[in-house]
Amino acid sequence: MTLVRRFVRSRAAAVGLGVVTVALAMVALAPIVAPMDPLDQDVTARLLGPLVASDRGLHLLGTDALGRDIASRIVHGARVSVLVGVASVAVAGTIGVLLGLASGYAGGRWDAGIMRVADVQLALPFLVLALALVAAVGPSLPNLIAVLGITGWVLYARVVRSETLSLREREFVTAARAVGATGVRTVLRHILPNVTSAIIVVATLQVARMILFEASLSFLGVGVPPPTPTWGGMISDGRAYISVAWWVSTLPGLALFLTVLGVTLVGDRLRDVLDPRVRDL
Amino acid sequence: MWGVSVIAFALTHLSGDPAALLLPPSATLEDIELFRRAHGLDRPLPLQYVEFLGRAVQGDFGRSIRHGVPALPLVLERLPATIELAAAALLIAVAVSLPLGILAAVRRGSALDQASLVLSLVGQAFPVFFLGIVLIILFAEDLRWLPASGRGTPAHLVLPAVALSAFSIAIVTRLLRASLLDVLSSDFIRTARGKGLAERVLLLRHALKNAALPVVTVIGLQTGALLGGAVITEEVFAYPGMGRLAIQAIANRDFAVVQAFVVLMAVVITGVNLLVDLLYVWLDPRVRIER
């Protein structure tokens, strides 16, 4: 309870939480909240401005080049963004935490091997690696989650490893070993609970990053393939019309910006409350 | 570097049979068999990898199936444009975040500090491609001050470089502020202040020098992020760099070009990291003793 109260004491964090709640509501209730079918085309009602009506009703945020309702597409696009963000963080977090624990606790050859692989990945910009991998396996929703998950593990592994290294030397770990706990049990029962707050902080901030990366890949045409509405794809589609219809690109961009900002604010506050030692990542 | 070569090699094989991928669907079974033999695809994978590595170290990644010329020179030709863009963005990032970070740390809690905080939050959340589009709408479409696409004059470089620098400005400002605050509260600064040094001398001679290390590290890391971000920026501004070439190559399934791009990218970034390490030794003599 005190944690929650400390969390909302920051106004920025409260705003962030509000934005995140709205985004999650859009995800859960997309078919109900969305005023129209996001795939429904109508060439007679193409590139209508915000608040212009067609015979299908009022287009709150206008229509795109195929006459699809932008408000409805933004609501449905939130599903892809949030799903990819959360799922890829879950994949990356699981791999990274396990490898980080192994690396930090076992040390020696394990540590050297795992950290070597991490270094190889860091020799390439995250986006370039993800881009090349998605290009190779083909763009689809599961592939995107897998690629972002597999390329994103390094950060967790590093944080967990350095925490584990210092925890390993503490008395309670030695005590657990002394009364006969196995290595796996020691790691899972005694070390893991002590690194969870750091993991939660990193994971929250990474959700924001992953949402950005998903949008970037969709923008470049190697994300979730059309006709599924994605924010990155919508921004890309609207580029051809920016001189005549500014809203097609900018409104989904605004949705993306606000969501990422909201998640970042929540993550920043979580860091202050849970684990101030985790620095800018 | 060796690890990166494995990734580059794996790229073509991850997608299944390269022969099936590169040949038109109308190819007969004999055609596929012939193609495999001609490209050595019928031999075991480790052997193929050794051959790939042997050619790669000589700079031979094969021919671009789209352009019909060797892949590496094709990518190399675009490298200067990309470096120009990334360097311009880095310059802007340093020019903005250095004074901003210092002022924010020195006048902690002031309106300027608050503004820098908001700026760094916004900069981190604003995707580069969206910022690019907003800049095009404002400065190219509306005001018609600057060109929206292409390359050639310095004016062409302004919008893409500004768009690309935003994220780095956010990160570096925040970090510089944090590490300066750390240093400013340390004992030796209090000593220096105690012996009556002027605030300006204190800040420039003692504090900044000690806050520089983490910042140099991050700027080194930012180079990777900038080169990665350049891929998107080039696409937005139709800027003829190697990122745009790679995106087109991916769309055309032109894997020789993608491989050359990935390896070249790793070479450049490894080179930059080496430079950063050398800079470290120069900035902090302690690093020399530790080695």
Image (cartoon, helix red, strand yellow):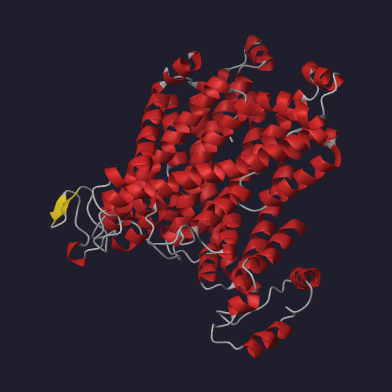
Observer able to see residue A258: no
x and y percent of residue A159 in the render?
67, 33
Is residue A212 positioned above or below A235 on the image?
above
The answer to whether A259 appears left or right of A107 in the picture is left
- Rendered image quadrant of residue B198: top right
Is residue B102 positioned above or below B187 on the image?
below
Is residue B286 positioned above or below B278 on the image?
above
- Rendered image quadrant of residue A182: top right
The one nearer the camera, B109 or B58, is: B58
Observer able to see residue B79: yes
Q: Tell me which residue sits at (61%, 22%) in the image.
A: B182
The one nearer the camera, A276 or A165, is: A165
x and y percent of residue B126 in the render?
42, 43
Q: Tell me which residue sits at (58%, 55%) in the image.
A: A130
x and y percent of residue A125 in the render?
61, 52
x and y percent of residue A34 in the render?
27, 47
